[in-house]
Amino acid sequence: MESFVYNIPTKIAFGKNQIQMLPELIKEYGNKILLLYGGGSIKKIGLYDEAIRLLKDNDIKYTELAGVEPNPQANTVRRGVEICKAEGIEVLVPIGGGSTIDCAKAIAVGAYYDGDPWDIVKNNKLITKALPIVSVLTVAATGSEMDASAVISNDEVGDKAEIYSELVYPKASILDPTYTYSVPAYHTAAGVADIMSHVFEYYFNQDKVLDIQRGMMNNVLKVCAKYGPIAVEQPDNEEARANLMWAASWAINGFIAGGTMSSWPCHAIEYQLTNHYKTTHGHGMAIIEIAWMKHILNEKTLPAFLEYGKEVFGVWGEGLDTAGDIIEMTKQLYERMGLSMTLRSIGATDKNDIPVMAKQAVEEFGLDYGGSLSLTIKDVEQIYESCF
Amino acid sequence: MESFVYNIPTKIAFGKNQIQMLPELIKEYGNKILLLYGGGSIKKIGLYDEAIRLLKDNDIKYTELAGVEPNPQANTVRRGVEICKAEGIEVLVPIGGGSTIDCAKAIAVGAYYDGDPWDIVKNNKLITKALPIVSVLTVAATGSEMDASAVISNDEVGDKAEIYSELVYPKASILDPTYTYSVPAYHTAAGVADIMSHVFEYYFNQDKVLDIQRGMMNNVLKVCAKYGPIAVEQPDNEEARANLMWAASWAINGFIAGGTMSSWPCHAIEYQLTNHYKTTHGHGMAIIEIAWMKHILNEKTLPAFLEYGKEVFGVWGEGLDTAGDIIEMTKQLYERMGLSMTLRSIGATDKNDIPVMAKQAVEEFGLDYGGSLSLTIKDVEQIYESCF
């Protein structure tokens, strides 16, 4: 059993109308905020107006940074950092999904760095301090509202990099499941696949973890399998939305990872799809996940597959065939939520992309690390090939 | 579905030899500490010497407060507060079980109060600020290492009261399961019953909670049923000790309580036993728990009992008889760990104590609040009676 450090300092205000806590949560850290959001969906659902009213009623000074991209760009981070420095911003308040919160995280550390914020994204060792973040979540998927990482793209140079620092855990996040009612079926489904993928990255390795961590992994998967299709079919089902929202946070906030290791192979493999075909991340994850599961299924990983089948789908059985059925049930779950399951269906046309993507995935993420789920370039090529 | 605020800021260093992190964890908050411990068991297992060596090697100035009682006394809190004020203590470092940590919590808030610390224990509204606490845990039971409460006794006036404040969450706690190897079988068993009781207080009410909260409740109970007897029989079984230690924290740190309500009836009923007969709290809990389960079992609570049986003991079945069997299995679990199951066996001799204890329990804790698990004085009398 490996040692670990558990440190999840984010305070969560969960439930309907918890937006009323926004002023109080902000004021613990300051009174001058940068309000970040994306394309304006928060205006459609009335959340923008309500937030502005609360800020005004409580004399909180705000500057807006609108138009944060679905894959937040280095240039947007640069703009945010400039505003913070020019106006002495004290708290960052992203309202939106993972992208908006990720952008805020990069701005938070960029504000304490003298050079180009992109440098700090590429080299996390330059991080020294971060502005506090109070987020309001509107999509259940990435877990950024309660985790320590952020992914920033730099399309100008065709690059993408991750910030990981305990300094960027949001100080507080408001999770009101009713804000996710307007998330379209497709993005709801992709979000569910994304949540499940955060668990799968740890689930099949042979590290011994504590039972309640393992139990949490099963719980998160169970919630996704049970409520994912319901949320897709009944967008305003509060029970489904609430359960998915809380599960999303716990899939990736660090709790299940304690004492275990993963090179996040499926994410490495999927990131290439997003780069090449602008795939929606969660959709790409669903496709890769199934192909990867088939690839790694063997006598060693079998017990984990059987456990997954029993806990999540109620399947009792032995042997590789049963495990194959369990993988098929996972595929059917994704399909039932409306996700297509081939790379062609998401824009891939040229099989010549495969060797390039496989090499990049393995080398950049060290997938051939030699552990129980190590993957060579050839393995990854086979995975892409099998779901093309 | 009720709203809730989740706020568990404690950082946990979990695993063998994590004591090496002690200086780093302390220095984040200061350099002058008050070291608290109980009767000296930490000297027997070598933990005291190791801690002192680490403090000295890292130039951390320490004052000792030894002899913290199993039910920490107001007078000990007073002594601690005096030391803090006189010496400008910056961090409290309790090494021990829940009592030592509870004592530190009371001192932490008492240090910022001008009057008698007992006032603040009795009236939590007087709490304004708290010294930071970095704890080292040696018993898996109360969960004080990761929660916001502390129970202090005042034997001089025959009273006992609780501090509840988010300010007293330890900033960090070191959880090394090997420190619990020396906990005697009896206290291990009582600790397991205590952990389970923290879940049972929420488990049978009819509040709808999120699935991963419910899953966590089941996980904690499963860990206790699986590893409790192992830890009693094989005191140095690392897997058992580690699982119990982490489960203890999650039983009571606030995670499972989000959005649900409880008047903690079994604790209210047990506290009277500790007051009257100096019962070991966890042992008293085991006895009361079984009597209370039998009392509250009805068609409304039945589904929760059946779920508990299925998840924890693998019992599939329907009806009140099955639920009765499940309660019996819980009793047998306690007995297998060596706990006797009658009040007589823990020192009760006079049935005339019952009306006094029942009245006190109901009135002090508001057990007759009118909710689904409301208990009248008569109910509580029956509960005591049935396990006398």
Image (cartoon, coloured by chain):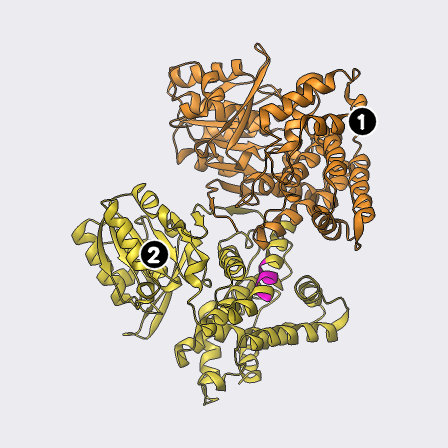
Chain colours: A orange, B yellow
Q: Residue at x 76, y 66 (%)?
A: B316
Residue at image location 31% in from the left, 66% down from the top: B38
Q: Position of residue B16 (x, y in %)?
A: 44, 53
Which stretch appears magenta?
A: B220-225
- Which residue is labeled 2 in the image? B105
Q: How far is mark 1 from mark 2, CA to CA?
A: 57 Å
Please state which amino acid type lies under the numbered disc 1: Thr
Q: Is residue B228 above or below residue A317?
A: below
Residue A137, visible in the rendered structure: yes
- Residue labelled with disc 1: A342
In the picture, the disc for residue B115 is none
Q: Is residue B15 left or right of residue B202?
A: left
Residue at 57%, 47% (x, y): give it. Answer: B3
Looking at the picture, does residue B150 appear above or below residue A82?
below
Which quadrant is home to the C terminus of chain A? top right
Nearest the eye: A235 or B214: B214
| Label 2 CA crowd tier, 10 Å (few <14, some 14–19, many 20+) | many
Q: Is residue A354 magenta?
A: no
